[in-house]
Image (cartoon, rainbow, N blue to C red):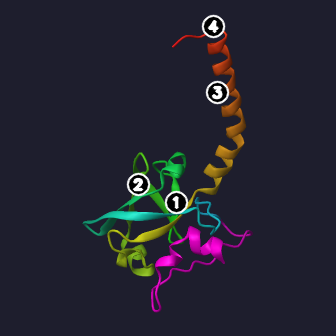
Amino acid sequence: MPETFNTTSLRQLVVGSAVQLERAIAANGRFGGHFVSGHIDAVAVIKKKEYRENALYMTIEVPEAYESFLLVKGSIAVDGTSLTIFHVVKSTITISLIPHTQNATILAAKNVGELVNIECDLLMKYVQQFIKPQQKAEKGMTQLLEESGFLSR
């Protein structure tokens, strides 16, 4: 299980650590708008926690390689809990935990500096995978046009 150990926050757990487990939604049921698969993309670091009225705002620094998947009003799973991103600055996101999420998950008990597992929106990953060859082709064509003297910067 080296892949799981190396790509998740499992490496920081000790006997007795709380772990969030979420069951997968049945494919024949109603989907609520967030598409995540339960496969961890990376670990991220909690940078800030702040209570505002009854909500807990958590600011999380996601590895830069995942910046293109971070979108305001987009979804992200944090330690298995699918949430909506409401603020993005480069590779840092802010999420808001409503009272139910604070009570029903382990997220509110996490401290600044702790690692959390991150899974980016599945649809965003598929879209990026689909357009990647097109982006490479466009970049290659632009470079070719510049080298041939048709474009100047």
Q: Secondary structure at mark 3?
A: helix
Alpha carbons under labels 1 and 3: distance apart:
29 Å
Where disc 4 sits, the SS reads loop
Q: Which numbered dot is residue 149?
A: 4
Q: Amino acid at mark 4?
A: Gly
Marks 1 and 2 in Cβ contact (< 8 Å)? yes
The one nearer the camera, 33 or 58, is: 58
Label whose residue precedes the other's in the sequence (3 or 4) = 3
Residue marked by disc 1: 76
Q: Residue at x 64, y 44 (%)?
A: 128
Q: Are marks 1 and 3 in contact (CB under 8 Å)?
A: no
Quickly name the residue at label 2: 93
Magenta-span inclusion, residue 65: no
The stretch of residues the image draws in magenta is 1-30
In space, the residues marked 2 and 4 are separated at their CA atoms by 42 Å
Q: Write down the residue under mark 3.
A: 139
- Mark count: 4
The answer to whether residue 24 is left or right of residue 111 is right
